[in-house]
């Protein structure tokens, strides 16, 4: 899927470099693992802030790792992605070893194709506009380190 997106993006850029916004190009660069892509923070009040209560990483019986994200005060709203902020709604971003893997639109995700060895998995809660939910300037995120054998 990532390869298809990259090819479509390359074709679009070749046809019309001005067709993409700088934000879209930054997202494409992040998808390729290039540094320098960061989302703005969406600071919210601590009392009503979305919370991550747990992140479980469980080895799948067939292959890969199953990721389970548990939240409070947060509703996954894939139908509102790329729209304006709506309090307590949005999606999550998944990072593997600091590189954005993709978006999470629900509580579960299957991580496939991880190389053997140690990996740091991070999940951030994001508003519809992709800004990272934060409290007092600290993004709402969780990370775990796993070892793939």
Image: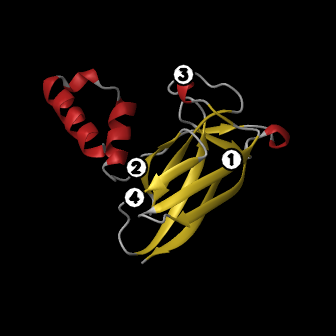
User: Is disc 1 placed on a helix, strand or loop?
Assistant: loop
Number of residue marks: 4
Disc 1: CA contacts within 10 A as few (<14), some (14-19) or many (>=20):
few
Q: Is residue 22 above or below residue 98?
A: above
Disc 4: CA contacts within 10 A as few (<14), some (14-19) or many (>=20):
few
**Side of 64 relative to 71 (left or right):** left
Q: Choose mark 3 or mark 4, whichever is in front.
A: 4
Mark nearer the N terminus (4 vs 2): 2
User: Is disc 2 placed on a helix, strand or loop?
Assistant: loop
**In the figure, residue 96 lies in which quadrant?**
bottom left
Q: Are marks 1 and 2 in contact (CB under 8 Å)?
A: no
Alpha carbon distance from label 3 to label 1 = 22 Å
The way the protein has been coloured in the rendering is: secondary structure
Reading the image, the residue beneath label 2 is: 36
Q: Choose mark 4 or mark 1, whichever is in front.
A: 4
Reading the image, the residue beneath label 3 is: 83
Identity of the residue furthest to the right in this view: 47
Disc 2: CA contacts within 10 A as few (<14), some (14-19) or many (>=20):
few
Mark nearer the N terminus (3 vs 1): 3
Reading the image, the residue beneath label 4 is: 112
Mark nearer the N terminus (3 vs 2): 2
- Residue 6: percent from left, percent from top: 25, 40
- The quarter of the picture where the C terminus appears is bottom left
Reading the image, the residue beneath label 1 is: 137
Residue closest to the eye, 107 or 100: 107
Could you say which disc has been placed on residue 54 in the image? none
Q: Are marks 3 and 4 in contact (CB under 8 Å)?
A: no
């Amino acid at each position: 899927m990532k390869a298809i997106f990259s090819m479509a993006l390359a074709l679009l850029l070749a046809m019309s470099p001005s067709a993409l916004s700088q934000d879209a190009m930054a997202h494409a660069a992040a998808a390729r693992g290039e540094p320098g892509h960061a989302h703005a923070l969406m600071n919210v009040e601590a009392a009503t802030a979305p919370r991550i209560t747990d992140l479980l990483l469980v080895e799948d019986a067939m292959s890969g790792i199953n990721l389970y994200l548990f939240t409070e005060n947060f509703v996954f709203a894939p139908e509102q992605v790329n729209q304006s902020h709506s309090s307590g709604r949005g999606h999550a971003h998944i990072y593997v070893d600091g590189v954005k893997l993709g978006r999470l639109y629900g509580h579960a995700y299957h991580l496939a194709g991880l190389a053997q060895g140690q990996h740091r998995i991070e999940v951030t809660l994001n508003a519809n506009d992709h800004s990272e939910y934060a409290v007092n300037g600290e993004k709402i995120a969780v990370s775990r380190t796993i070892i793939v054998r």
